[in-house]
Image (tube, rainbow, N blue to C red):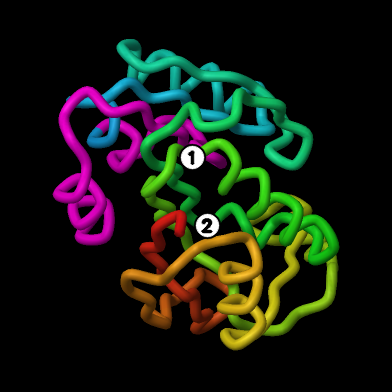
């Protein structure tokens, strides 16, 4: 939540926020929606249904973030926590470009990016269900962000313990549309 608070400290109350991969309405989603207009997007109809119940004052849409069509310049910030690692490598750069287009000038991106340099693969038994994973290394992540038009405000690789998988590292980034 520290990273969410960092973002919230940078934007004015009543800002337009987009959360990609919002899941079922996590504490981060609730916090983002407290003082802002939030559109949450998730590919799972069940997760969107849960989010609507948990965060009724936000708007939610069931969609694939890589196919999402939104008005250019319509958001002050985009948040995407633990979603980009579930997007095929070939679609990550175009998605970051779309995110940049959806942001207003000077808008912020708060995201986590995988750092394992893993090719597209499906883990057939991730927490009891099949799950798709893909990531680049830190240098490639930084290039993708720069190429999409983002200037890093802060970036830090943070390891987390994933049940049944050991330690996995994510690069947390706070970036601004340049």
* Residue displayed at 68% across by 33% down: 43
List x then y, in percent, for residue 149.
56, 61
- Above/below status of 172 relative to 67: below
Q: Which residue is labeled 1 in the image?
A: 103
62 on left or right of 64: left
Q: Magenta residues?
A: 1-30
The quadrant of the rendering that contains the C terminus is bottom left
Q: Earlier in the sequence, mark 2 or mark 1?
A: 2
Residue at 64%, 54% in the rendered image = 96
Q: Nearer the viewer, residue 5 or 94?
A: 94
Instruction: Give the SS element for disc 2.
Output: loop
Q: Secondary structure at mark 1?
A: strand
Q: Is residue 122 above or below residue 157?
A: above
Q: Nearer the viewer, residue 63 or 10?
A: 10
**Are circles 2 and 1 on residues that touch, CB within 8 Å?**
no
Q: State which quadrant residue 172 falls in.
A: bottom left
Q: Position of residue 21 (x, y in %)?
A: 56, 41
Q: Quadrant of residue 41?
A: top right
177 part of magenta stretch: no
Residue depth check, mark 2 versus mark 1: number of the one nearer the observer? 1
Residue 60 versus residue 125 in the image, above or below: above
Query: Which quadrant holds the N terminus?
Result: bottom left
For label 2, the residue is: 82
Give the left or right position of residue 10, taking residue 89 as reference. left
* Residue 157 falls left or right of residue 96: left
Q: Position of residue 17 (x, y in %)?
A: 38, 32
Which quadrant of the figure has residue 133? bottom right
Q: Within 10 Å of the Cα at label 2, are there few (<14), some (14-19), or many (20+) other Cα atoms?
A: some
Q: Residue at x 28, y 35 (%)?
A: 32
């Amino acid at each position: 939540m520290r990273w969410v608070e960092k973002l919230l400290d940078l934007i004015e109350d009543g800002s337009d926020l987009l959360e990609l991969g919002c899941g079922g309405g996590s504490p981060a989603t609730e916090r983002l929606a407290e003082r802002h207009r939030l559109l949450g997007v998730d590919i799972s109809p069940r997760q969107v249904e849960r989010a609507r119940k948990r965060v009724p004052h936000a708007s939610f849409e069931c969609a694939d973030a890589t196919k999402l069509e939104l008005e250019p310049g319509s958001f002050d910030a985009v948040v995407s926590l633990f979603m980009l690692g579930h997007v095929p490598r070939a679609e990550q750069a175009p998605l970051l470009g779309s995110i940049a287009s959806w942001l207003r000038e000077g808008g912020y991106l708060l995201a986590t990016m995988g750092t394992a340099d893993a090719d597209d693969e499906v883990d057939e038994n991730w927490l009891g269900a099949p799950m798709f994973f893909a990531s680049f290394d830190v240098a490639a992540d930084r290039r993708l962000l720069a190429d999409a038009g983002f200037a890093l405000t802060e970036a830090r690789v943070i390891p987390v313990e994933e049940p049944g998988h050991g330690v996995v590292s994510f690069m947390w980034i706070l970036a601004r549309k340049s």
